């Protein structure tokens, strides 16, 4: 474009003078100003002025692409979607420190892990020793309990998924993960306070109950006890089973799994080996 301006104003040959007259190729010349000539001259002037006066246009940057409306951002009333839960993981519901306590108990805690890891717990779930769960003999399954170590004051909220501990003078069996959280893992036992925060059923009323006897080292002794109890309690279901650690147990399920009947059986029963425990099934 600059080259066009320079050739028109500097390098172009001189135009004939539009004066009164002159001689062109030896013949008299009279300039003619017809309509066609005027029009052509005007077009030439317009071309020269627009060509020389045109400024170089600045190229604006391309606008950014429009936002992807296929995934709208959450509004103030919406929260971003949570990541899907990991299969097999037990998520403990959050409870504030001042959550109301439904029931409390103080006693000794222990913990368990292998060889129960990846085996089915009493509530039907697969036990993961790294999750915040615990075993209790009488609290409804899937209750939430805050466990506080009375010496270190560390606490953790666990969900009751299993039954135990089947050891006298202990009130709760923590998973290995929960035991680490409240300083029970290394010493093996510790005095704790249980504060029940939530239960799916009444603690004092209802439920399904049984009596469990063990641990019995010898299978023959366990089978003899089973036969004796079956003869004594005609309407009860008596069975013998082996635990994951190899010892033997006898369980007595009274008629309709009633708590009062199970308590009566437990109070009048004796065993040559092991201990007698009143256990809630649900």
Image (spheres, grey):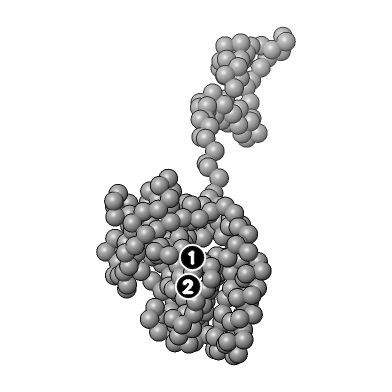
Q: Which residue is label 1 attached to?
A: 166
Q: Viewer-proximal residue, 201 or 250?
A: 250
Q: Position of residue 245 (x, y in %)?
A: 60, 57
Q: Viewer-proximal residue, 98 or 203?
A: 203
Against 281, is 260 above or below? below
Around disc 1, counting alpha carbons within 10 Å, would you say few (fewer than 14), some (14 to 19), or many (20 or more)?
many
Image quadrant containing the N terminus:
top right
- Residue 43 shows in this picture: yes
Task: Give the residue displayed 62% in from the left and 70% down from the top.
Answer: 222
> As drawn, which residue projects farthest toward the front?
272
Task: Give the residue displayed 51% in from the left and 34% down from the top.
Answer: 60
Q: Viewer-proximal residue, 35 or 239?
A: 239
Q: Quadrant of residue 115?
A: bottom right
Q: Position of residue 102 (x, y in %)?
A: 32, 73
Q: Earlier in the sequence, mark 2 or mark 1?
A: 1
Against 198, is 232 above or below? below
Q: Is residue 205 left or right of residue 217?
A: left
Q: Is residue 13 left or right of residue 131?
A: right
Q: Which residue is label 2 attached to?
A: 277
Instruction: Label 1: state its secondary structure.
Output: loop
Around disc 2, counting alpha carbons within 10 Å, would you say few (fewer than 14), some (14 to 19), or many (20 or more)?
many
Distance between mark 2 and mark 1 Cα atoms: 7 Å
């Amino acid at each position: 474009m600059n080259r066009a301006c320079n050739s028109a104003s500097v390098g172009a040959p001189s135009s004939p003078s539009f004066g009164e007259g002159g001689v062109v190729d030896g013949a008299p010349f009279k300039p003619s100003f017809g309509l066609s000539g005027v029009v052509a001259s005007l077009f030439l002037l317009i071309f020269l002025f627009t060509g020389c006066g045109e400024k170089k246009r600045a190229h604006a940057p391309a606008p950014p692409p429009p936002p992807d409306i296929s995934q709208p951002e959450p509004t103030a009333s919406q929260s971003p979607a949570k990541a899907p839960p990991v299969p097999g993981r037990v998520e403990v519901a959050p409870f504030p420190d001042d959550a109301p306590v439904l029931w409390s108990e103080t006693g000794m805690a222990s913990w368990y892990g292998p060889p129960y890891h990846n085996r089915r717990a009493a509530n039907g779930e697969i036990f993961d020793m790294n999750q915040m769960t615990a075993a209790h003999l009488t609290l409804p399954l899937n209750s939430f309990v805050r466990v506080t170590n009375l010496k270190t004051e560390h606490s953790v909220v666990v969900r009751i998924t299993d039954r135990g501990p089947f050891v006298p003078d202990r009130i709760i069996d923590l998973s290995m993960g929960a035991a680490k959280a409240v300083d029970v893992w290394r010493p093996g036992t510790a005095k704790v306070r249980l504060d029940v925060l939530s239960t799916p059923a009444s603690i004092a009323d209802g439920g399904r109950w049984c009596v469990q006897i063990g641990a019995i080292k010898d299978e023959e002794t366990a089978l003899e006890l089973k036969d004796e109890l079956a003869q004594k309690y005609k309407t009860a279901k008596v069975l013998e089973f082996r635990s994951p650690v190899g010892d033997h147990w006898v369980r007595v399920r009274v008629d309709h799994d009633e708590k009062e009947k199970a308590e009566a059986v437990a109070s009048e029963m004796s065993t040559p080996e092991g201990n007698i425990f009143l256990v809630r099934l649900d």
